[in-house]
Image (spheres, helix red, strand yellow):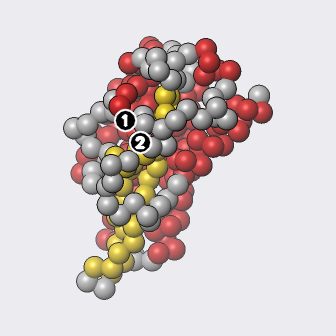
Amino acid sequence: MLIRILMKVFISLLLILNSTLLVGQSDSILFWNKDYSLTVNDFEGEINDSIMTKQFSITPSAVSYIGISTEYKYHDGKLNVIIKTYFNRNKSFCRDSLIQSILEHEQCHFNISELYARKMRREILKLQIKSIYSNQKFDEVIDSLNIECVKYNDLFDYETFYGGIESEQKKWIENVNKELDKLNEYEN
């Protein structure tokens, strides 16, 4: 039980990560793109035994290092924030026997993070429309939605048993894709 809780905390910390270090895309960083789906080859990291639990030994699995990066910039004297969803290939890993449903599961986590990045962009734009260009206000929006993103990802894992219940996972994938479509205007 303790290991499962620690794993959730670790994964949650990864999802909360707001980094200003991800300015450009390197070979190890993959920014979310509607025209690209994760492949087995994107999981280049070495298996981390401290993360793998008994649950993972039962089913083929993967661990994705996914985050939402933020970069603050001034444009025409006004503060702006660039928000990007990323997947770190070097820190993401999988078992040798990764199956399609688990790959789809990890892609859905990536999509959920992009969904929340779009919500962040929408809320930041609402503030800007009101002529609010406050770093503090932007951070409040981003932090709040990051917490929601972690909870939503946790619910996805719980309801699909980490991808083990394919019928539930299919429903989630369809729902997340519909939600992404609704927020299409906030795509990066």
Percent position of residue 147, x then y = 56, 50
Q: Residues within 10 Å of mark 1 (few under 14, many from 20)?
A: many
Comparing 62 with 47, the one in front is 47
Comparing 45 with 122, the one in front is 45
Q: On the image, numbered disc 1 is attached to which residue? A: 42
Percent position of residue 53, x then y = 67, 26
Kindly give the residue lying farthest to the front in the view shown: 46
Which of the labelled discs sits on residue 87, or is there none? Answer: none
Q: Residue at x 55, y 47 (%)?
A: 14
Report the quarter where the N terminus lies: top right
Which element type, helix, strand or loop, lies under badge 1?
helix
**Given contact means CB atoms under 8 Å apart, are the residues at marks 1 and 2 in contact?**
yes
Which element type, helix, strand or loop, lies under badge 2?
loop
Q: On the image, numbered disc 2 is attached to which residue? A: 89
Kindly give the residue lying farthest to the left in the view shown: 35
Residue 134, picture quadrant: bottom left
Could you tell me the amino acid type at mark 2?
Answer: Arg
